[in-house]
Image (cartoon, rainbow, N blue to C red):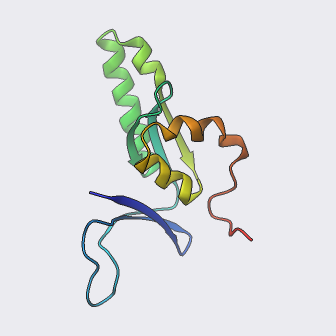
Amino acid sequence: MELQYQLKEGAYNLYDMSTPASTVTGERRLRLRTDTVAIAFDVRTGVLHEHGSPLRIHSWALNTRRRLRSSGAIDQANDLVVVSGPLPVDEINKCLTITGYCRRMFTRLSTLPHGKRLRH
């Protein structure tokens, strides 16, 4: 599966680029449409765990941290970070395709442009 986000009509659309485009519309099957995107990753390694709508990802992270702490994996629970908001599409897609990229994006988060503004 080759997932990719695209910004269309002010929303983030997630497509599986490995599926063929529709012969009628020319579009690939839409897997998710959301106003903002959340990314859950390990802050130490930068490994991506989950991505998608903020409500689902924050809930997943809360439950995962709870399970990790109850099993004694305190450090792993503390390393789980969720970033959400109008992030630049190219940064989100790099997180999906480049192992460890989430950590690099996280260090530059304060300097990233608003994800829904057009660049000139």
Comparing 33 with 1, the one in front is: 1
Q: Residue at x 44, y 38 (%)?
A: 40
Give the side of residue 26 with respect to residue 36, left or right: left
Picture layout, residue 4 above or below residue 103: below
Q: How many marks?
A: 0
Q: Residue at x 27, y 83 (%)?
A: 22
Please state, as top left, top right, bottom left or bottom right, where the N terminus lies in the image.
Answer: bottom left
Residue 80, percent from left and from top: 45, 27
Comparing 49 with 69, the one in front is: 49
Q: Quadrant of residue 64?
A: top left
Picture layout, residue 26 above or below residue 64: below
Judged from this view, the residue extending furthest toward the top is 72
Q: Residue at x 40, y 61 (%)?
A: 4
Judged from this view, the residue extending furthest toward the front is 98
Q: Residue at x 68, y 66 (%)?
A: 117
Give the side of residue 60 with respect to residue 82, left or right: left
Please state, as top left, top right, bottom left or bottom right, where the C terminus lies in the image.
Answer: bottom right
Residue 20, percent from left and from top: 25, 75
Residue 47, percent from left and from top: 42, 34
Residue 67, percent from left and from top: 31, 21
Judged from this view, the residue extending furthest toward the bottom is 24
Comparing 82 with 90, the one in front is: 90
